[in-house]
Every structure is written in structure tokens, then in C-alpha cells.
Image (tube, coloured by chain):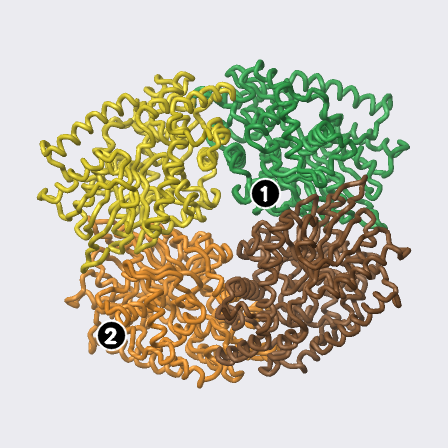
Chain colours: A yellow, B green, C orange, D brown
Amino acid sequence: MNYNGNKAENVKIAYIGGGSRGWAWGLMSDLAKAEDMSGKVYLYDIDFEAAKHNEIIGNRIKDIPECKSAWEYRAVRTIGEALDGADFVVISILPGTFDEMESDVHTPEKYGIYQSVGDTSGPGGIIRALRTIPMMEEIALAVKEHCPDAWVINYTNPMTVCVKALYTAFPKIKAFGCCHEVFGTQKVLLTALKDICGISDAKRDDIKVNVVGVNHFTWFTKAQYRDIDLFEVYKKFADKYSDSGYEEQIDDNWMNNSFVSAERVKLDLFNRFGYIAAAGDRHLAEFCPGHWYLKSPEQVKEWKFGLTTVAYRKDDLVKRLQKSARLVSGEEQFKIEETGEEGVNQMRALLGLCDLVTNVNIPNTGQITNLPIGAVVETNAVFRSDTLLPVMSGEVPKEIYSLVSRILGEQETIVDAGVNRDLNKAFMAFTMDPLVNLSVCDAKKLFDEMVLNTKDYLNEYFN
Amino acid sequence: MNYNGNKAENVKIAYIGGGSRGWAWGLMSDLAKAEDMSGKVYLYDIDFEAAKHNEIIGNRIKDIPECKSAWEYRAVRTIGEALDGADFVVISILPGTFDEMESDVHTPEKYGIYQSVGDTSGPGGIIRALRTIPMMEEIALAVKEHCPDAWVINYTNPMTVCVKALYTAFPKIKAFGCCHEVFGTQKVLLTALKDICGISDAKRDDIKVNVVGVNHFTWFTKAQYRDIDLFEVYKKFADKYSDSGYEEQIDDNWMNNSFVSAERVKLDLFNRFGYIAAAGDRHLAEFCPGHWYLKSPEQVKEWKFGLTTVAYRKDDLVKRLQKSARLVSGEEQFKIEETGEEGVNQMRALLGLCDLVTNVNIPNTGQITNLPIGAVVETNAVFRSDTLLPVMSGEVPKEIYSLVSRILGEQETIVDAGVNRDLNKAFMAFTMDPLVNLSVCDAKKLFDEMVLNTKDYLNEYFN
Amino acid sequence: MNYNGNKAENVKIAYIGGGSRGWAWGLMSDLAKAEDMSGKVYLYDIDFEAAKHNEIIGNRIKDIPECKSAWEYRAVRTIGEALDGADFVVISILPGTFDEMESDVHTPEKYGIYQSVGDTSGPGGIIRALRTIPMMEEIALAVKEHCPDAWVINYTNPMTVCVKALYTAFPKIKAFGCCHEVFGTQKVLLTALKDICGISDAKRDDIKVNVVGVNHFTWFTKAQYRDIDLFEVYKKFADKYSDSGYEEQIDDNWMNNSFVSAERVKLDLFNRFGYIAAAGDRHLAEFCPGHWYLKSPEQVKEWKFGLTTVAYRKDDLVKRLQKSARLVSGEEQFKIEETGEEGVNQMRALLGLCDLVTNVNIPNTGQITNLPIGAVVETNAVFRSDTLLPVMSGEVPKEIYSLVSRILGEQETIVDAGVNRDLNKAFMAFTMDPLVNLSVCDAKKLFDEMVLNTKDYLNEYFN
Amino acid sequence: MNYNGNKAENVKIAYIGGGSRGWAWGLMSDLAKAEDMSGKVYLYDIDFEAAKHNEIIGNRIKDIPECKSAWEYRAVRTIGEALDGADFVVISILPGTFDEMESDVHTPEKYGIYQSVGDTSGPGGIIRALRTIPMMEEIALAVKEHCPDAWVINYTNPMTVCVKALYTAFPKIKAFGCCHEVFGTQKVLLTALKDICGISDAKRDDIKVNVVGVNHFTWFTKAQYRDIDLFEVYKKFADKYSDSGYEEQIDDNWMNNSFVSAERVKLDLFNRFGYIAAAGDRHLAEFCPGHWYLKSPEQVKEWKFGLTTVAYRKDDLVKRLQKSARLVSGEEQFKIEETGEEGVNQMRALLGLCDLVTNVNIPNTGQITNLPIGAVVETNAVFRSDTLLPVMSGEVPKEIYSLVSRILGEQETIVDAGVNRDLNKAFMAFTMDPLVNLSVCDAKKLFDEMVLNTKDYLNEYFN
């Protein structure tokens, strides 16, 4: 990598999971718009063909008129080729296939447990974590070997677990986890600002928030637009919409648009606890006691959010595969779009091209004063030249401490279980989960069944 | 108070709740055996007659041959008389009557919620806390006025809530909460030591334990008898008895003997989490997710502990009233017994007559490293001349952090609710409770009903 | 205050010490260039005439062609008028006159103690602190009464002491201390970058630093320009110049230009301790053991920095008074200049017009992990809409912990002394100072003499 | 090791430095009186003959009528023989000979630096630390290999440095440092209690103190005898004696009796700072700025303590060698005496034979809230069955924070220097020392000379 005036050139990005037909295309869009950066993206994927397709798609982008920055894409067959000399490493993998995810999400339904996402917490998130942790360890050790000074950006879920696993395997790794759920909630506040105050020209990053919590279950303890306290605004918004829900679509991010809700969960949590939960309702519901929002499909419907089925995901994948084929063949042209993601801006800041303050998942060194040191938490952080430092974000308020600390403990335990390949410890986390309202004996049956269903990815736990 | 050689004389103890027919008699026994202390006990109770009866009972004790220390008992009509010039204040009150407790314990059963004690946590403990907090405030302020330097020993439940309320009302109060559940668990370890190793001459206080947690949900993270690691011993005990339960009675403390269990909850928690929960099974069950041990009376039976009904308590009260009458009339003679309590030893240590290391409930100043500063926690502490300092007890282990922190947050929230006379905040705590596996709407119905049932003691919440 | 598009209008700034002929003019310059802010500046000074003159000077600025933002200046006779409804409060006062400062700086010379500045630490700084603390208390209480939500920017020295005194008098004050010494050291790094690497187009705020310490004795533990580790660069710079000193002038800030040094102190500290001390050599020398750099005027000369005499300051004041007269009369025109200060940018950020990460003096809430909580420290912080939060800055490195913690303790003690009007406690701080290499008895004589010399400003200490 | 009723039998103690003619004999005395312990002491010393002599001396003790506990002594030629299977390890070594100590103590006098002890802090303590650290590392690694679960008691100075070096080399070591200076100060309080209050029957361990600081520079922040606040008593004692000094001998411990003082340093520190410094005046003086008490031999005389010359120590050694010869030959009989040390009681407590609360040097895990985590500090701790846990001791008071933290930083730096065999880093610590009031250049000359003088023991620093 080198600088040429105000531009960083020859930046090398290693993309682990480079066959992705979602996040990878988003990154391609964002890189194409980054005028002050250029370089190469090495795509590594266990499905080499998928990476190869993305290489073809990516290398066509520079010919699109809107492209402001030329990047070269290259699929490689080994992780070492991708990582050697990398400045940045992006991790966006699917741990297992949608068949495993089918078990994660739907097997618990036999026991009356409904999950709206099933990839972070809940029985599904726990089993997914077991599959993911050994993969993260492998990646961390490869980073240690090939590019120990590279910055590593993780997008994979379960986020908290992944980031902790990276740091456990390679404590000096410069890794952080990146998630757009907070952005989505900032957009909710934009909506409220317009609906209540009639202000419509504010932008997402004008909404300044203080963030505390764990990923997908972060909370705003302050939200401000200029001199306006957005808690006052959101209170009025809640009074207006908490019963009916806010039915208009808030987020038109093309990555998110199939997962709308009417915000009723978020509004209910605000009414009851006084703080703004900063993730989509589908995520939030899974971190709360099961009887609150996820007792039954009927209750879900009442709260006006959706259960994302794996059938939907499989169907969506088919569409994305078709799109990929069209992009590869040239039948369809790649479209450079606004993703709203901050990964590329984070890279720019780490390269010294700007300062950036945004939310991030990293180990707690004191930024949240009443959660354990070392646990991975989500707060704001400052990104600057080769530096990432969390902002002192205060404490998790008393009112929501039980909810948040419970999840944090569960996730710390599941990492321990994964790192030690210890199914007994995994079962500890399983029984502590807010959705697992089962007797210990039934919980064990469910756990065993889910482990069995996904055993192809859990070999190491049986040695 | 003054010293005469190695004796402390003219010690003044104020007993708030001095009409008690349980703890008060226990204290009388222990004081009668304390050869190096003497003085006066002022009995204050809203039921003056009850205090008066105890005055009569207490003043007869010096005539019993086994009595080694003469104490004068005196019932007083105002709390000020009791507190003026007191060296120690003992708080052991019943917040409300057994009628309120009947609502606390049994109303939730309509919603399928069973409580084995109902005085600490669970819906019952929460409502009881609301009644208790204003009383504790009143006592703390009276201490501030009348005897700000006195040491205050609380026995009232919910313990954590009471101690926090005392400190909130008068931050410089020298108060601590005292509970015998840890002692009971030390006796369990004596039993295991005998059963597994054949060692039968060890005494309770030879069992050295490291204690972390919140009252009634404390955990041993280390237990040692001389050079024997009692975790190894308890593991063998668990292998032997966790299925069947240990049916012989471990504890013959006359205060506890109606509440036996077969230890199956404790053994199950140990098997699953690797640490020894240090309270009776009836208490432990209430802090765990409701489906584990308290889903139904049948499940309780399987786990071989009991649901303490309020009918039992009322019946027991009748017997104690009868006993009181016999003691007052002289028909029955007071018996100086071994209570196993440490209150009097704590007083002796604070007077400089000995050093004592034992468990205690006080605000966290760092003794538990991963729980919030300021929250009331239970750990060991050192008692010496006018000094009480906690022992650095380390962290709550990852495996049980979720369980413990959840309760801690709930109890911090209920104190906040009580201090601010805020029923909305109380409902926050209510919905977070592990036993309240209800939809928000049902939880609200139950909460409102329980508040209504006990509204005579909740006037201040309705202004 | 209100917003008009991207501009904040009708901003009210209260300037305490508004007769200043240095900082006030700097602020006027910076405000004149702030295109997105406008409003009024209320000038309050115990010397009303001085404030009045600045009113005249300030109100002429809008007629200068380079002026991009019109501000109205108004001298007021009471602090209340200045503060009522203020959005920002700027504090820049001289505690006492140059006669008191003459005693502060030069009386210790009789005892062989030489001070290069004498306004922060050393015997002079300590006595100055005693004068200043009651003034800061008064200001804090006035803020509490008139504008409790205003942001308060302090420029007065001793900085650490002033900020702590503000927070002690009004714990909820939104105050921070602002100092340009770190900026000066960033410029030193620009110089090194040019001298060693030939890079000359970098700007001060491209130099990203991690800052830890107490004001005027802060240290960089990391310094980065893009992908260049500036510690490596500064090491080479030190090898080249530590013996001779770097004689070319680094800083042409018109506020600083009479105080040049050859950087030998900073280079020596770097060579010996491995970290970059982030203040001018004149300041740094005063915080180190007296025999290192300030043993005698000859030693000062060797280290190639200067002792700023109060005679110089008095002379300089005469020049500034003359300049003021010319500006008031119109004989001289006010010149809008680059001050390099960040006060106005901090205001813009707090108004939500930009994000800003810069160094600041505020109480430690954990941003420095091995210094006491509550002590005022200097680190980076994030400024955003109505929000100021420190960045987690890690620990003071072992190698310099003794030097820094010693000063911190001294300054905490002097605040305690000031707040309690306790000269005995002030003497504690006095004897702990690194420059006071005297027997206790001699130290007492010097202390008493310095107190006597400045007793007009220390009345409250004699009641 | 095994238990027989209430006795611990076959306890194995490894004594490193087992040829000692001071501490070793003290331990022999204390073991001879320990009725509930018996076993073997393995004496290891680089001077095998000295160890052999102690073997002979020790094995005769069981024939003395006052001996209540038979111990077998055995000199061994390798450290491994001593450590294998040891329950306890005692470290009491002299790092180097009195020739090195002669340089440590007296070379600085050429530069006007006087040291009263020269073994802990000051230029002498620092050079001694450099010799000692590699020895401690070697011992720690031998413990790791031979008896990782043994409890290790260090008596060697510099205490703080030694303990930290042990933990650095083997982080899981169960080591603590043991020092009697606190006991000496408790005896001072006994004296004051008698002198001021006429109470003469109190015993040293009736004086309950809260201890904070670093070894030889610890402070009492509370001292209590029963209901008497000893700070009040000591205040009167100070009023009475601070000018004249208290000339009667306080301590008749045979180990200490050549080192009397008139307590003027301690009284002066109390008068000025309000806390009781808990070590002998000779030690305290060395931790304070050099001009306070150690500016010149005349000043030392005024403050009525002594400079312990190495000539005295050498002379004393000759006497002890003679005594040793007499004891070995049988010409003189070993006398079982009261040492006042607590090492044997600590062993008894760790064996589960009693509880003990006493002061100890171990790494800070939070017991002192405003000193860095990990630094070795001195506070009270609880000794129980195989358990050593510090007591939460609060913060170092503001008034003395500068003094204490400065020393702590110096000692942390010297350990770093030693561990890394880095003389440059050692020089950092050297220049930070309160006694080294020299220009950097002179300090370097002195440092180099002292290193050269003792280079036989500093080989590893020159590779």
C-alpha cells in the first residue's frame, strides 16, 4: 500500500467468504464509490467457483460509468494467498449451509420455541455459534501467520461470539465487528423526527447516539439531533404509534428490505424501560424472555414483525444465484448502489483519510463500566490512522441491566464451550437462553436433536 | 458501653421488630451464651404487646443455670428510645402480615407460577420489596438521627433489597445483612465430607469457602477443608446422590427444620454449572428460570423440595404464639440453644473481642470484580474492632454470570422502584423475573392484582 | 439559539475574563471565520473598561472584508447578565495581577528554585491555584444558577486545578479545559516528518496521537501519520538533534512565538523514557525533578529553553494595552488570523455541525485506566451534538507513571486545600512538588513568604 | 503432609537461603513453639556449609525443654531437593555480599546522597534489585518445576520487587511477601496507648489497622483498639513528642534492636499528612524527597534516627558467625525466643489450623482502588485453608498519593528493567528516585559507578 497525494493506492483487501452474493456485492459498490482508495480484493471461499464468479463480476465494475475507483478482483484457492500482505481482512461467511440453518431455526418449533432470525441468540444462534467458533479460530490463526498487522472486519453472525473467538485465538488481532442494525435504528429516529417535528432534511449520521450493549441487543442511552433530545421526540412517536405500530417502511436499504416490521417491539421496550433498543424488532424479540414477543406465531403477528423462515432464505438464495449467473454472463449489469454500510469508511479512517466515530463490536476495556472487562460489547469508537479506540460509553442502565447481562453471560459461555469443544458447557448456555422456556430434560432433548442434525459441522466436539 | 478487662459491658442493642417469636428468641439464646458481653436489649415493635412479652421472656433468662451473661430486656414504645445511644441495631421485621404474604405467594399460582418461599425474588419477593423499602428508609433515617455510628444488622428479607434501601436512605450507615443459608450449605459439605471421606469430626466453620453472589443465590467458587478440595468431594457426592437425592436430614438447626429438601436442586446446579449454590433448594429454585424446578407442584415433588405454604406459616405462627404465652406465663421455661447464627459473634468482633471472617451482604466496592459497583452483594468480609471490610472474592464465574447478574439487575431495579414509589419501574423488575414466564399483558394483570391485594401497605405508591 | 439550514444562529457566548487582550482577540478571529455560526458574545470582566474596549474592537470586526460571520459583542457589568441563557461559557481570567505572579515566579529564586512558567505547577503554580480556586467556585455556582446546561470551556491555568474546582463546586457542570500545548507538539512531529522523511504537505490534524496525562504534562503513547509510525520518525529526529537541539522555530502561532525552545527537554525525555511529552519544554521542565532541567539559569541555558520572567510579561502587557488602545481608536485595524485554537470547532461540534476528536481536560471516568477515577486528566475525547465523551486512552506507561502520578496527586491535594481554604493542606502539596528541593523547614519559610506576598487574594484562607 | 487430629504432621518446608544466621534462627524458634505442626525443613544455600551448620543447630532444638514441636533440619546441595514435594517455601537470601551492599549504601555518599538502609529504594535499593531479580526468577521457575502448589513466603528485600519478580516469572505462583515493619508500628501505637491513655495490657494484635501502600512505605488509614480511635491517641502523642522525639525504646524484638529511632520522622509525617506511616523511620526517610530527612548526616541526627552503615553490618555478621560456631559446637545453647514474626502463623492458617488476618505483599487485584492493577502492594489479607485473599482496603488517601504512587512506579520500572536485563530502563527508575537529587548527567555517573562496583552480580545485563 502507498499514498499518492490524498489517495491510498494498492490497498490489499482479503475477503474471506468471497463467494458471497450479498455482502460481497455491497462491498464492491462501496469500493467503486471510494475515490480516494484503490487496490486489489482477493476473494477466498470454500466454494471456489462462487469466488471466481465474483471475480468476474467485480472486474467488470471499473467499466461502469459511475465507478470512481478501480479495484481488481481475484479469486484465490488458499486463504494464505488472500491474506499475505493484506491491509484489511473482511470476514463474511455462512457457517454451514441453509440445511443446518433450517435445523437451527425450525427444530425448536417442535418444542414451541419460535425464532425470528435464529442466527445470534436463541437455540439456533447457540448451535450456529458452535459451528462458527472453530472457523473463526482458523481464520484468526491464519491472520496471525500471514498478516498479523492487518485490520480485520467481521460481518458474520453471531457477531459477539465471532469477535470474541477471533480475539481468543489471536489476542493481538486488530479485529472488530461491524453491524448495520444501529444505522437502521438511527433511521427510525429520522422517521420520528419527521413525523413529530416535521424535520425532513436530517441525515442518518446527523443522529448522534450513545450506544451500549451487545450486538443485536444494543441500546441508545442518549440520542440527539443538533439541540433536540430525540428521547423526547421518540416518546411522542411512541405515544402515537405503540398500539398500532408504524406501518410505513422506514428502511429502504436493499439489503434489508424484506424484513420490515411495524416497530411495535421497539416501542414497547421503550415504553416499558425508557431506552431505545437499537436493532430491528426481529432481532430484539429473540433476546427478550420468550413469552414477551415470541410465544407463538399469533403473538408475533400481534407485535407486527415476521418470522424469517429458512424456506424464504433458500428461495432468496436461488434468486441470488440466478442474478449471479446473469451478472457473470453479462446479461445483467452490476449496479453501483448506496448500501449505507460503513466498512469502506472505516477502512478510509484507518488509512488516515478521515476521522470516523461509529459503533463497533470489540472487547470491553472499560468503555461500558458495569459489564465485565474482556467481554465483547457494542459501543461507539473512534477510527483514525491505524487506530481504533472505544468511546467511554458509561453504564448499561439499571433498568435493562438484567436483560443485557444475561445475554452477555450466555455468549461468553458459548464461546468458552466452542473454544474447548465442550458440548456440556454449550448446554449451559442453551438452558440460560431467554427463549428456552423448557424443563432441563426437554431442553436436553432439543439440544441433542439440534446437535445431531448439524453434526457434519460439529465433528471436533465429538473427539 | 465500656470494657472491663476482656469483657464489653453495658452494650446497648436496639432490636427493631423486637416482638419477633423466632429471631428474637434466637438472639436471646446467643447473648445468654456470650460470656464476654453484657448489657441491654431494647425491643421496639409496632406490636408493642409482642415486644413486652419478649421483655418478660428475656428478663427471665438470667435465672436459667446455663445463662452465662446477664442481659436486660426492655420493650419501648418509640423507635427513638430504642436507638438512642445504641451500639448495635438489629432489624428483623415482617413487612405486612401473613395475609399480604398469602397474596405474595399464592396469587401467582392462578397464572401457573409456583413459589417455594416467595420472600426474596419471584413475584412475591418483588411485591414484598415494595412494602419493605419505605420501612427500611424510615429505619435508616431514624438511625441517622439517633445513632449514626451504630452497627446495623439486618435479618429481614428480601435481604439484598433491604440492605440497599438502608444505604440509599443513609449512605454512611454502617449496615450489613446477615443470612444463614451459607452456613446451611457448609453443613451440606460436612455431610459430604462424612459420606465420601469418612471424616466426621469437622465443624461447620472448618469448611472454608469463597462466596460470590447475591443473597439466597450465592455460590461457592472454592471450598476447602484443610488440604481437601471439597469440590472434588462434592463431585463424588453428586455422582452418588443427584438422581435419588440425599434423604437424610442435614440441618438440625431448630430454626430451619421444617424446610428440608433432598438437595437435588443444588446437586443439579453443580452437575450442570460446576459451582456449589450456597442456599437451600427452596431458595435456589426461585432464582432459576421457572421451567427448571418450579413449573408445577409435580415438578417440585420430583426435585424433592417443598413449597412452603402461607397456611403452614400461619399455623406455625399460632404455635409460636402459644409458646410465647407459655414462656410469658412461666408455664414453659426458655431453653438456651445452639442457633448456629453469627450475629452475636459479629458484634463481638466489631467490639474488638475477636477477629471474624464470615459472609455478609454489603454494597460492592470491588470485592466482586465483574458485578456493578454499588450493588449489594454477598461475599466474605473481615469483622474487627469497629471495622467491616469485604474480602476480595474475585469474579462470578462465566458459567453462572447470566443467572446471577439477571437477579442483581432485578433487585437494583426494584429498589429504584421502591425508593421512587414508582409502580411502573416495579413492573419492569416484575417482568424480568425468572419465574414470570407470562406475556407482558398477563404479567400486568397479575402485578396489578397483587398490588391491589396488598394496597394497605402500598399507600405511598398511589400519591 | 436556533438553526437556519446548516447554520446555528443567535448563539450566545459568555466570556468570563472578557477584557483579555490575548485569548479574547483569538476567539474573535476564530468566530469571524466560522461561517456556520453567528450570535452574541457577552464580555464580563472585573475590569469593565477592558471588556468595554473589547466590545468596541469586536463590533468592528464585521466590517473587515475577511469576516465571514457577524458576531455582536457586548460588555456587561454582572456575571449574571453574561451567563443568562448562554449556550457557551468561556473562562479566561488572570487570577490576581502580574504583581502576584511576580511573587509566584520570582520569590522561589531566593531559595534556588527557578521556574520557567510558574503558572501550573511548582511553588508558583500552587500559590496561583490557591487564588484561583475560589474564583472558579464562584463561576461554577453562577453557571449553576444562570445557565446549568451551558457548555463551559476553561482556558485559565492551572488548568487541571481549575477544571476540578469547577466540577467540585457544581458536579453536573458541562465543563472542559482546553489547551494548545498538544497542538504545538503535533507541529513538532510535522517538523520531524519533514526533516526526516521529507514529507511537507501534512497538516497538524493529520497527526493522530493518543494522549495521556495531566495538562502541560501530557504524553503521546502513539503518534501516527497515515501508515507512518511517528515514534520511529521522532527517534531519528532525536538521534539527530538531541545534543544540539533543533534551533529553527517550529511554531509560528502568534500566541506562542515569544516562547521558543530548542526542544532539548522533549528530546531528552523521549530518549530516556521512550514516550513523547506533549507540551513546550518550558512547561515540561517544571514537572520534572528540579535537578534535571531547572537547577540553575545556567542549566536552563544548556537545555536551550527560557525562563519567562514576569518583567517580560509586564512589558508585553504594556504592548498589548497600547495595541488595544490603537484598535479601540481605530488607529490599527483588527487582523483576522489563524490561531490554531480549537475552541470554536469544539462549539461547532457541540452544536451538531461536525464531529470532532481532540484532546481535552475532564475528570477521569476510566479513560486512563491506571489513574484515579475523578482526577482531572487530559486525553482525547469525542465532541458531537451536546455530547462530550472521552476516548479510552489506556494506561500511563510504567516508565512515566511515577512522574505523572506524582503531579496528579499534588494537584488533587491543592484543589482539596483550596476548596477547604486550608493552608496546611496547601503546604502538603507544596512540599511534594518536584521543584521544591528544600528541607521542610525552608519550604515552610518560602511558602509563608509567598502566601504573605499575595495575601490580598487569599483573604478567605485566614478566616 | 498429613493431619493427625488437630495437628499437621510431616509438613515440608524448603528454606532458600537456609544458611542465614538471622531469619533462619527466628523461624527455628517459631517452629519449635508451634504445637500443632511438625515436619522437616530443607535448608538450601549457595553456601552449603552455612546451611549445614544450621542443620546441626536446628536438629539440636528438639532437645531443649521449651521445644514443643520436633522438626528435622536437613541441608541439601540442590534447590530441587529442597523444593520437591515442599508444602512451603521460605525465601530469605542476601543478593550478593556485604561488599556489594557497601557500594549500594556508601557510593552515593560521594554525591551527597545518604541512605539509612539502602536495601529497598534509593540508589542502593535499585542496584540491589538488579542483582536480586534474576535470582527470584530462578527460584520462581524452580518452584514451577518442583512444587507449583507450594506456598512461597518471601522475606528478601527489596520486597515489592522480589514479589513482583516471582509473579512475573511464574504467574500462578502462590507467593506473598512478609514484613514486620507494620508490627513495629503497631507497637508504637501500643506505646502511645500507654503513654496517652494509660492502657498497658493491650497486645500488638489487638491494634487493628487498615494498611495501604507499598512495602516499607505502607500507611495506616485507620487504627483502632476496641472502641478507641488510635488516630486521636496518636495525635496527642504527636503533640507531646514530635519536637523532642520519643526516646524510650519501643521495640525489643531481638531482630530489630540495633535500629532504634526517636520516631520523629513518623510523627512529622503524621503532623503534615494526617496518616500514620507504618515502618521504621530509617525506612520511611528513604521514600521521601531527599531534602526532608536525609539531606546530610547532620539532618539525620536532628531527626533522631540512624544511618545503618555496612561496616556495622559486617561487624554484626562477624558476631553472628561466632555465635553460629558456638551453637554448632554446642558451646552455646540455642534459645527459643519470641520473634514476633507471623510466618509460622501464616503457615498454620494456610494449613487450616486457624484463620488469620494480617498484612502481606501481593499483586493488586483491586484491594487498593486507586493504584494500578498488577502492581505489588501491601494491605491486609485473609489466610485460611490453602487460601490467601486480600481485604478491600480502599484508596491511598489523596494527601499521600503522590508519595506512594511515585515509589510504586519506580519499583514497577525496576522490575521491568531487571526482567529485561535492561540497564537503560534501570536508569529511568534511578533518576525517578526521591533521593537522587542530581542532574541527569551526575545521576548517570553515579549509576555507572554503582553498576561497575557490583558487576560480578550483573553479568546478565551485559550480554
Amino acid on which disc 1 is placed:
Pro
Q: Position of residue A343 (x, y in %)?
A: 27, 44
Q: Disc 1 vs disc 2: Cβ atoms closer than 8 Å?
A: no
> Is D113 on the left or on the right of A252, as rendered?
right
Label 1 and label 2 in one chain: no
Above or below: residue B127 compared with residue A223:
above
**Distance Cα–Cα, label 1 vs label 2:** 62 Å
Q: Nearer the viewer, residue C433 or D184?
A: D184
Q: Which mark is residue C328?
A: 2
Above or below: residue A385 compared with residue C328:
above
Q: Position of residue C125 (x, y in %)?
A: 47, 72
Dot 2: few (<14), some (14–19), or many (≥20) neighbours within 10 Å?
Answer: many
> Is A210 on the left or on the right of B249, as rendered?
left
Q: Chain of mark 2?
A: C
Dot 1: few (<14), some (14–19), or many (≥20) neighbours within 10 Å?
Answer: many
Q: Nearer the viewer, mark 1 or mark 2?
A: 1
For the residue labelled by badge 1, is the local secondary structure a helix, a strand or a loop? strand
Amino acid on which disc 2 is placed:
Val
- Tell me if I can see residue D90 in this picture: yes
For the residue labelled by badge 2, is the local secondary structure a helix, a strand or a loop? helix
> Is A64 on the left or on the right of C245, as rendered?
left
Q: Position of residue C290 (x, y in %)?
A: 50, 77
For the point 29% across and 78% down, the residue is: C248
Q: Which mark is residue B363?
A: 1
How many numbered dots are placed on residues in this image? 2
The quadrant where residue C191 appears: bottom left
Q: Position of residue B241 (x, y in %)?
A: 65, 22
